[in-house]
Amino acid sequence: MNGPNKPRAPRNRTLTLSESEQTVLAQQLLRAPLPGGVAALTDRIVCGDFIELLPQLPKAFVDLLILDPPYNLTKRFGAESFRERSLAEYEAWFADWFVRVLPLLKPTASLYVCGDWKSSAAVHRVLDRHVIVRNRITWEREKGRGAKTNWKNASEDIWFATVSNAYRFNVDAVKLKRRVIAPYRENGQPKDWQDEADGPFRLTHPSNLWTDLTVPFWSMPENTDHPTQKPEKLMAKLLLASSREGDFVFDPFLGSGTTAVVARKLGRRFLGIEMEERFACLAAKRVALANDAPSIQGYTGGVFWERNTLNVQPKPTTPAADAHPMLLESLAPYRATKSKAK
Protein backbone atom coordinates (compact mmCIF):
# COMPACT_ATOMS: atom_id res chain seq x y z
CA MET A 1 0.00 0.00 0.00
CA ASN A 2 1.21 3.52 -0.72
CA GLY A 3 2.15 5.31 2.47
CA PRO A 4 0.63 8.54 3.82
CA ASN A 5 3.69 10.52 2.63
CA LYS A 6 3.11 9.69 -1.04
CA PRO A 7 2.98 12.93 -3.12
CA ARG A 8 -0.61 13.73 -4.11
CA ALA A 9 -2.27 16.24 -6.39
CA PRO A 10 -3.80 19.33 -4.69
CA ARG A 11 -7.36 18.15 -5.40
CA ASN A 12 -6.72 14.59 -4.22
CA ARG A 13 -9.15 13.86 -1.37
CA THR A 14 -7.86 10.39 -0.47
CA LEU A 15 -8.12 9.80 3.27
CA THR A 16 -4.73 8.92 4.75
CA LEU A 17 -3.46 7.88 8.15
CA SER A 18 -0.42 9.49 9.75
CA GLU A 19 1.96 7.56 11.97
CA SER A 20 0.87 9.57 15.01
CA GLU A 21 -2.80 8.84 14.29
CA GLN A 22 -2.04 5.15 13.93
CA THR A 23 -0.19 5.14 17.24
CA VAL A 24 -3.19 6.63 19.03
CA LEU A 25 -5.89 4.62 17.27
CA ALA A 26 -4.01 1.32 17.63
CA GLN A 27 -4.49 1.61 21.39
CA GLN A 28 -8.26 1.69 20.93
CA LEU A 29 -8.52 -1.46 18.84
CA LEU A 30 -9.71 -4.66 20.48
CA ARG A 31 -7.32 -7.60 20.41
CA ALA A 32 -7.30 -11.17 21.70
CA PRO A 33 -8.50 -12.21 24.16
CA LEU A 34 -11.81 -10.57 23.32
CA PRO A 35 -14.19 -9.36 26.03
CA GLY A 36 -17.24 -11.50 26.61
CA GLY A 37 -20.76 -10.50 25.61
CA VAL A 38 -22.29 -8.64 22.68
CA ALA A 39 -22.32 -5.27 24.45
CA ALA A 40 -18.54 -5.20 24.80
CA LEU A 41 -18.13 -5.94 21.08
CA THR A 42 -20.71 -3.45 19.83
CA ASP A 43 -19.36 -0.77 17.45
CA ARG A 44 -15.81 -1.99 17.86
CA ILE A 45 -12.96 -2.87 15.53
CA VAL A 46 -10.74 -5.84 16.29
CA CYS A 47 -7.19 -6.27 15.04
CA GLY A 48 -6.38 -9.93 14.57
CA ASP A 49 -6.91 -13.10 12.57
CA PHE A 50 -10.66 -13.67 12.60
CA ILE A 51 -10.31 -17.43 12.13
CA GLU A 52 -8.35 -17.62 15.38
CA LEU A 53 -10.84 -15.29 17.07
CA LEU A 54 -13.96 -17.25 16.06
CA PRO A 55 -14.13 -19.36 19.25
CA GLN A 56 -14.18 -16.15 21.32
CA LEU A 57 -17.24 -14.65 19.61
CA PRO A 58 -20.80 -15.00 20.96
CA LYS A 59 -23.23 -17.42 19.38
CA ALA A 60 -26.24 -16.23 17.36
CA PHE A 61 -25.57 -12.49 17.63
CA VAL A 62 -25.35 -11.50 13.94
CA ASP A 63 -28.32 -10.15 11.97
CA LEU A 64 -26.34 -9.46 8.79
CA LEU A 65 -23.04 -10.99 7.75
CA ILE A 66 -20.86 -9.24 5.17
CA LEU A 67 -18.04 -11.36 3.74
CA ASP A 68 -15.47 -9.81 1.44
CA PRO A 69 -12.67 -12.40 1.61
CA PRO A 70 -9.56 -12.35 -0.58
CA TYR A 71 -10.51 -13.25 -4.14
CA ASN A 72 -8.69 -16.10 -5.86
CA LEU A 73 -5.88 -13.81 -6.97
CA THR A 74 -2.31 -13.26 -5.92
CA LYS A 75 -2.54 -9.94 -4.10
CA ARG A 76 -0.81 -8.17 -1.26
CA PHE A 77 -2.76 -6.45 1.54
CA GLY A 78 -0.24 -4.41 3.50
CA ALA A 79 2.01 -6.92 5.26
CA GLU A 80 -0.32 -9.81 4.39
CA SER A 81 -0.73 -11.52 1.03
CA PHE A 82 -2.96 -14.10 -0.67
CA ARG A 83 -1.81 -16.42 -3.41
CA GLU A 84 -3.94 -17.73 -6.25
CA ARG A 85 -4.80 -21.43 -6.08
CA SER A 86 -6.91 -23.93 -7.99
CA LEU A 87 -10.69 -23.55 -7.82
CA ALA A 88 -10.95 -26.74 -5.74
CA GLU A 89 -8.34 -25.46 -3.29
CA TYR A 90 -10.06 -22.10 -3.00
CA GLU A 91 -13.38 -23.85 -2.34
CA ALA A 92 -11.80 -25.96 0.40
CA TRP A 93 -10.20 -22.88 1.97
CA PHE A 94 -13.48 -20.97 1.95
CA ALA A 95 -15.53 -23.91 3.25
CA ASP A 96 -13.09 -24.60 6.11
CA TRP A 97 -13.74 -21.31 7.89
CA PHE A 98 -17.23 -20.54 6.58
CA VAL A 99 -18.84 -23.42 8.48
CA ARG A 100 -17.31 -22.05 11.67
CA VAL A 101 -18.95 -18.67 11.09
CA LEU A 102 -22.47 -20.10 10.82
CA PRO A 103 -23.04 -20.53 14.60
CA LEU A 104 -22.59 -16.77 14.99
CA LEU A 105 -25.69 -16.07 12.87
CA LYS A 106 -29.23 -15.67 14.13
CA PRO A 107 -31.86 -17.97 12.54
CA THR A 108 -33.26 -14.87 10.76
CA ALA A 109 -29.86 -13.65 9.52
CA SER A 110 -28.92 -12.78 5.95
CA LEU A 111 -25.48 -12.81 4.40
CA TYR A 112 -23.70 -11.36 1.39
CA VAL A 113 -20.47 -12.80 0.01
CA CYS A 114 -18.32 -10.86 -2.46
CA GLY A 115 -16.30 -12.53 -5.19
CA ASP A 116 -14.97 -12.19 -8.71
CA TRP A 117 -15.34 -14.54 -11.66
CA LYS A 118 -12.41 -16.69 -10.49
CA SER A 119 -13.85 -17.30 -7.02
CA SER A 120 -17.60 -16.94 -7.56
CA ALA A 121 -18.29 -20.55 -8.55
CA ALA A 122 -16.48 -21.90 -5.48
CA VAL A 123 -18.35 -19.50 -3.20
CA HIS A 124 -21.69 -20.58 -4.67
CA ARG A 125 -20.94 -24.27 -4.16
CA VAL A 126 -20.07 -23.78 -0.49
CA LEU A 127 -23.05 -21.54 0.21
CA ASP A 128 -25.42 -23.97 -1.49
CA ARG A 129 -24.39 -26.71 0.95
CA HIS A 130 -25.01 -24.71 4.12
CA VAL A 131 -27.46 -21.83 3.58
CA ILE A 132 -30.27 -20.82 1.24
CA VAL A 133 -28.88 -19.02 -1.80
CA ARG A 134 -31.33 -16.33 -2.92
CA ASN A 135 -29.59 -14.48 -5.72
CA ARG A 136 -26.36 -13.38 -7.34
CA ILE A 137 -25.79 -9.66 -7.77
CA THR A 138 -23.38 -8.55 -10.46
CA TRP A 139 -22.05 -5.02 -10.23
CA GLU A 140 -20.00 -2.99 -12.68
CA ARG A 141 -16.68 -1.80 -11.31
CA GLU A 142 -15.93 0.52 -14.24
CA LYS A 143 -12.24 0.23 -13.49
CA GLY A 144 -10.25 -2.59 -15.05
CA ARG A 145 -7.26 -3.09 -17.29
CA GLY A 146 -7.86 -3.71 -20.95
CA ALA A 147 -6.75 -7.04 -22.42
CA LYS A 148 -5.70 -7.89 -25.96
CA THR A 149 -6.55 -11.61 -25.74
CA ASN A 150 -9.53 -11.57 -23.36
CA TRP A 151 -12.55 -9.55 -22.29
CA LYS A 152 -11.83 -6.67 -19.93
CA ASN A 153 -12.69 -7.70 -16.36
CA ALA A 154 -14.98 -4.94 -15.07
CA SER A 155 -17.54 -6.69 -12.85
CA GLU A 156 -17.79 -8.54 -9.55
CA ASP A 157 -20.39 -10.77 -7.91
CA ILE A 158 -22.15 -10.64 -4.56
CA TRP A 159 -24.01 -13.76 -3.45
CA PHE A 160 -27.14 -13.16 -1.36
CA ALA A 161 -28.18 -15.95 1.02
CA THR A 162 -30.18 -16.48 4.19
CA VAL A 163 -30.00 -18.90 7.10
CA SER A 164 -33.71 -19.73 6.82
CA ASN A 165 -36.93 -18.67 5.12
CA ALA A 166 -37.61 -16.27 8.00
CA TYR A 167 -35.61 -13.30 6.78
CA ARG A 168 -36.23 -9.65 5.96
CA PHE A 169 -35.82 -7.81 2.69
CA ASN A 170 -36.70 -4.12 2.68
CA VAL A 171 -37.36 -3.55 -1.01
CA ASP A 172 -38.69 -0.01 -0.59
CA ALA A 173 -35.43 1.05 1.06
CA VAL A 174 -33.30 0.18 -1.96
CA LYS A 175 -35.26 1.41 -4.94
CA LEU A 176 -33.29 3.29 -7.58
CA LYS A 177 -34.35 6.74 -8.79
CA ARG A 178 -33.99 7.03 -12.57
CA ARG A 179 -34.82 9.63 -15.18
CA VAL A 180 -37.80 8.61 -17.31
CA ILE A 181 -36.79 8.54 -20.97
CA ALA A 182 -40.29 8.02 -22.38
CA PRO A 183 -42.80 9.35 -19.83
CA TYR A 184 -46.20 7.72 -20.34
CA ARG A 185 -49.37 9.41 -19.16
CA GLU A 186 -52.77 7.93 -18.48
CA ASN A 187 -55.72 10.34 -18.54
CA GLY A 188 -53.18 13.14 -18.60
CA GLN A 189 -51.48 12.01 -15.40
CA PRO A 190 -47.98 10.48 -15.02
CA LYS A 191 -48.16 6.68 -14.85
CA ASP A 192 -45.63 5.16 -12.41
CA TRP A 193 -43.40 8.25 -12.41
CA GLN A 194 -43.24 11.71 -10.85
CA ASP A 195 -43.07 15.02 -12.69
CA GLU A 196 -40.46 16.92 -10.67
CA ALA A 197 -38.80 20.31 -11.07
CA ASP A 198 -35.76 18.74 -12.72
CA GLY A 199 -37.72 16.45 -14.99
CA PRO A 200 -39.56 13.12 -14.90
CA PHE A 201 -38.20 10.50 -12.45
CA ARG A 202 -39.27 6.99 -11.49
CA LEU A 203 -38.48 4.82 -8.47
CA THR A 204 -37.62 1.39 -9.88
CA HIS A 205 -37.40 -1.95 -8.12
CA PRO A 206 -33.80 -3.03 -7.50
CA SER A 207 -32.45 -5.71 -9.83
CA ASN A 208 -29.46 -8.00 -9.44
CA LEU A 209 -27.50 -6.03 -12.05
CA TRP A 210 -25.97 -2.85 -10.61
CA THR A 211 -24.58 -0.26 -13.02
CA ASP A 212 -24.98 2.82 -10.81
CA LEU A 213 -21.85 2.40 -8.68
CA THR A 214 -18.48 4.09 -8.79
CA VAL A 215 -15.37 2.52 -7.33
CA PRO A 216 -13.80 5.05 -4.91
CA PHE A 217 -11.14 7.15 -6.58
CA TRP A 218 -8.84 10.06 -5.71
CA SER A 219 -11.41 12.88 -5.80
CA MET A 220 -13.88 11.12 -3.48
CA PRO A 221 -13.54 11.76 0.28
CA GLU A 222 -14.31 8.10 1.04
CA ASN A 223 -11.29 6.96 -0.98
CA THR A 224 -8.34 5.33 0.79
CA ASP A 225 -5.20 3.53 -0.34
CA HIS A 226 -6.72 0.11 0.37
CA PRO A 227 -6.34 -2.00 -2.82
CA THR A 228 -9.84 -3.53 -2.81
CA GLN A 229 -12.05 -0.91 -1.16
CA LYS A 230 -15.80 -1.26 -1.78
CA PRO A 231 -18.00 1.81 -2.41
CA GLU A 232 -20.07 3.09 0.50
CA LYS A 233 -23.08 3.19 -1.82
CA LEU A 234 -22.73 -0.55 -2.50
CA MET A 235 -22.57 -1.37 1.20
CA ALA A 236 -25.52 0.90 1.93
CA LYS A 237 -27.66 -1.13 -0.46
CA LEU A 238 -26.81 -4.36 1.35
CA LEU A 239 -27.42 -2.94 4.82
CA LEU A 240 -30.67 -1.17 3.96
CA ALA A 241 -32.07 -4.19 2.14
CA SER A 242 -31.29 -6.79 4.78
CA SER A 243 -31.16 -5.09 8.18
CA ARG A 244 -33.04 -2.64 10.34
CA GLU A 245 -31.80 0.19 12.54
CA GLY A 246 -30.17 -1.32 15.61
CA ASP A 247 -29.45 -4.67 13.94
CA PHE A 248 -25.99 -6.17 14.34
CA VAL A 249 -23.74 -6.27 11.26
CA PHE A 250 -20.56 -8.37 11.30
CA ASP A 251 -17.68 -8.06 8.84
CA PRO A 252 -14.65 -10.30 9.56
CA PHE A 253 -12.66 -8.98 6.55
CA LEU A 254 -13.12 -5.31 7.38
CA GLY A 255 -10.32 -3.88 5.24
CA SER A 256 -10.51 -0.08 5.20
CA GLY A 257 -13.76 -0.18 7.17
CA THR A 258 -16.52 0.54 4.64
CA THR A 259 -19.01 -1.83 6.32
CA ALA A 260 -18.42 -0.24 9.73
CA VAL A 261 -18.62 3.29 8.32
CA VAL A 262 -21.92 2.66 6.55
CA ALA A 263 -23.32 0.86 9.60
CA ARG A 264 -22.47 3.93 11.66
CA LYS A 265 -24.14 6.25 9.15
CA LEU A 266 -27.29 4.11 8.93
CA GLY A 267 -27.71 3.43 12.65
CA ARG A 268 -26.70 -0.23 12.71
CA ARG A 269 -24.50 -1.83 15.34
CA PHE A 270 -21.33 -3.42 14.00
CA LEU A 271 -18.27 -5.49 14.71
CA GLY A 272 -15.37 -5.55 12.28
CA ILE A 273 -12.21 -7.65 12.29
CA GLU A 274 -9.09 -6.74 10.31
CA MET A 275 -5.72 -8.49 10.45
CA GLU A 276 -3.58 -5.58 9.19
CA GLU A 277 -3.20 -3.00 11.97
CA ARG A 278 -2.82 -0.05 9.61
CA PHE A 279 -6.09 -0.85 7.84
CA ALA A 280 -7.84 -1.42 11.19
CA CYS A 281 -6.71 2.02 12.36
CA LEU A 282 -7.78 3.56 9.06
CA ALA A 283 -11.21 1.98 9.56
CA ALA A 284 -11.39 3.39 13.07
CA LYS A 285 -10.56 6.85 11.78
CA ARG A 286 -13.24 6.62 9.08
CA VAL A 287 -15.87 5.52 11.61
CA ALA A 288 -15.09 8.44 13.92
CA LEU A 289 -15.14 10.95 11.07
CA ALA A 290 -18.50 9.60 9.89
CA ASN A 291 -20.07 11.57 12.72
CA ASP A 292 -19.10 14.79 10.91
CA ALA A 293 -19.76 13.45 7.41
CA PRO A 294 -22.85 11.19 7.54
CA SER A 295 -23.72 11.39 3.85
CA ILE A 296 -23.29 8.53 1.36
CA GLN A 297 -22.47 9.52 -2.19
CA GLY A 298 -25.32 8.49 -4.50
CA TYR A 299 -27.82 8.00 -1.63
CA THR A 300 -29.76 11.14 -0.71
CA GLY A 301 -33.33 11.91 0.17
CA GLY A 302 -33.81 8.31 1.26
CA VAL A 303 -33.28 6.88 -2.23
CA PHE A 304 -30.45 5.67 -4.43
CA TRP A 305 -29.81 7.70 -7.56
CA GLU A 306 -28.47 6.63 -10.91
CA ARG A 307 -25.17 8.04 -12.13
CA ASN A 308 -24.81 11.62 -13.38
CA THR A 309 -27.69 13.06 -11.35
CA LEU A 310 -25.66 14.84 -8.66
CA ASN A 311 -26.95 18.24 -9.78
CA VAL A 312 -30.58 17.30 -9.04
CA GLN A 313 -30.05 15.31 -5.85
CA PRO A 314 -31.21 16.97 -2.61
CA LYS A 315 -28.55 17.89 -0.11
CA PRO A 316 -28.17 15.17 2.54
CA THR A 317 -29.72 15.96 5.90
CA THR A 318 -29.54 12.58 7.68
CA PRO A 319 -27.79 12.99 11.04
CA ALA A 320 -25.20 10.43 12.06
CA ALA A 321 -25.36 8.38 15.23
CA ASP A 322 -22.77 9.13 17.92
CA ALA A 323 -19.45 7.51 17.18
CA HIS A 324 -17.83 5.31 19.80
CA PRO A 325 -16.57 7.71 22.52
CA MET A 326 -13.08 6.22 22.62
CA LEU A 327 -12.68 6.68 18.88
CA LEU A 328 -13.88 10.28 19.06
CA GLU A 329 -11.48 10.97 21.94
CA SER A 330 -8.63 9.47 19.93
CA LEU A 331 -9.39 11.71 16.98
CA ALA A 332 -9.85 14.90 19.00
CA PRO A 333 -6.41 16.33 18.07
CA TYR A 334 -7.03 15.53 14.39
CA ARG A 335 -10.48 17.13 14.38
CA ALA A 336 -9.19 20.25 16.16
CA THR A 337 -6.46 20.63 13.56
CA LYS A 338 -9.00 20.14 10.79
CA SER A 339 -11.24 22.87 12.25
CA LYS A 340 -8.36 25.36 12.46
CA ALA A 341 -7.49 24.64 8.86
CA LYS A 342 -10.92 25.80 7.81
Image: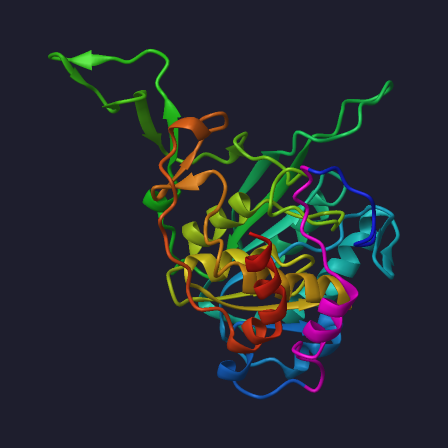
Residue 179 % position (x, y)? 37, 21
Q: Is residue 293 in view from this perspective?
A: yes
Which residue is the extreme one toward the left? 187
Q: Is residue 135 magenta?
A: no
- Quadrant location of residue 311? top left
Q: Is residue 18 magenta?
A: yes
Residue 256 % position (x, y)? 67, 57
Q: Is residue 260 in view from this perspective?
A: no
Please tell me which residue lies in front, 242 or 296.
296
Left or right of 160, for residue 334: right
Identify the magenta region.
11-33
Left or right of 292, for residue 102: right
Residue 328 versus residue 154 in the image, above or below: below
The residue under the point 79% across, 60% down is 93
The residue under the point 13% across, 12% down is 188
Residue 151 % position (x, y)? 77, 22
Residue 111 versus residue 300 in the image, above or below: below
The residue under the point 62% across, 62% down is 337
